Amino acid sequence: MNRNAHCAVSLLQVDCFSDVCGMIPFFRRDHPNQLYRLFISLFVHAGLLHLAITVLVQLWLMRDLEALIGWKRMALLYFVSGIGGNLASAIFVPFNPEVGPSGSQLGILAALLVDVYHHRSFIAEPWKAIGWLLLVVFLLFLAGLIPWVDNWAHLFGFIFGLLITIVTFPYLDFNPEEKTPTEKSNENEEREIEREEASRRILKGLWRRRLAVTVSFVLMTSLLGILGYFFIWNVDMNCPFCEYFNCINIKRITGSDHFCDNSGQELTKWLPI
């Protein structure tokens, strides 16, 4: 294996996994689960074209959002979405290699949807903006129906991005239907009663915000725990229809019955022996 001779042992005693997988040795020889790959794979790409697409998408989606929420929250959003998407992929398509931050990118799109919806009263055409974002999400899921693109990373990256956005974004604590602070101050000078009503609305919004954060945090940690359990204990996902969520073969277009085999990947000379 990789030109490593094992002269002192018989064939049945050779540890092939260690030579093939490489990187950090397994913590347990009988459980070759290298959990750090869920993180490292976010920075690995399948080629220059894949890398260029990632950079362009990040410049388009992440630059303004990072300026708005700060790099710490952006890093949390990026990594939680990406790792959550990779974890789901490792469960539903465990034998197919995957690289790239597709889960992170769907998580960022989810964050933008929450941001636009929350500030809809301050946007001239909010539903048009939401429609464009939903169209991008739909096209990405549509692209996930062909090989080489993983819809499980898309789906769970979007879910984790949606939940972590509600938990961490700093400005989701006011009623989007409220007026701007300048309008409020002018009205409060005229009538004291509106100040009390505004205070009650703000307090109600704070309680609504706390409830949303609590529910989202519980859902996010529960989902992460369930996926982690399925991954660590190698629970078999008996779902015959799940394969159609990740790839659909239309024979009239592809001209082949094996278009979706191995997610379109052809492994040649997999082992150097």
Image (cartoon, rainbow, N blue to C red):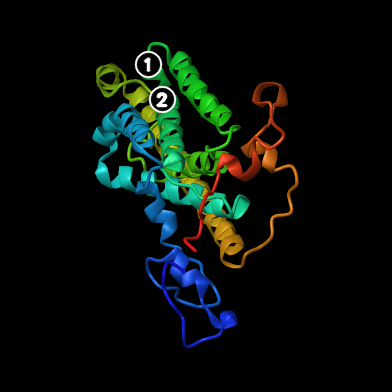
Instruction: Sort mark 1 into few (<14), some (14-19) or many (20+) by Cα contacts within 10 Å.
Output: few
Q: Position of residue 13 (x, y in %)?
A: 56, 83
- SS under mark 2: helix
- From the viewer's perspective, is 256 left or right of 17? right
In x, y percent, where is residue 52? 33, 32
Which residue: 52% across, 41% down? 159
The answer to whether 152 appears left or right of 170 in the picture is: right
Kindly identify which numbered label has been placed on residue 223.
Answer: none
Cβ–Cβ under 8 Å for marks 1 and 2: yes
Using a 10 Å C-alpha cutoff, classify the residue at mark 2 as few (fewer than 14 neighbours), some (14 to 19) or many (20 or more).
some
Q: Which residue is mark 1?
A: 123
Q: Is residue 213 visible?
A: yes
Q: Residue at x 47, y 88 (%)?
A: 8
Labels 1 and 2: the sequence-earlier one: 2
Query: Is residue 221 depicted above or below 14 in this figure?
Result: above
Q: Amino acid at mark 1?
A: Ile
The residue furthest bottom is 8
Q: Is residue 193 above or below residue 156?
A: above
Q: Which mark is residue 116?
A: 2
In the picture shown, does residue 138 fall above or below 25? above
Residue 175 in view, yes or no? no
Side of 273 relative to 255 (left or right): left
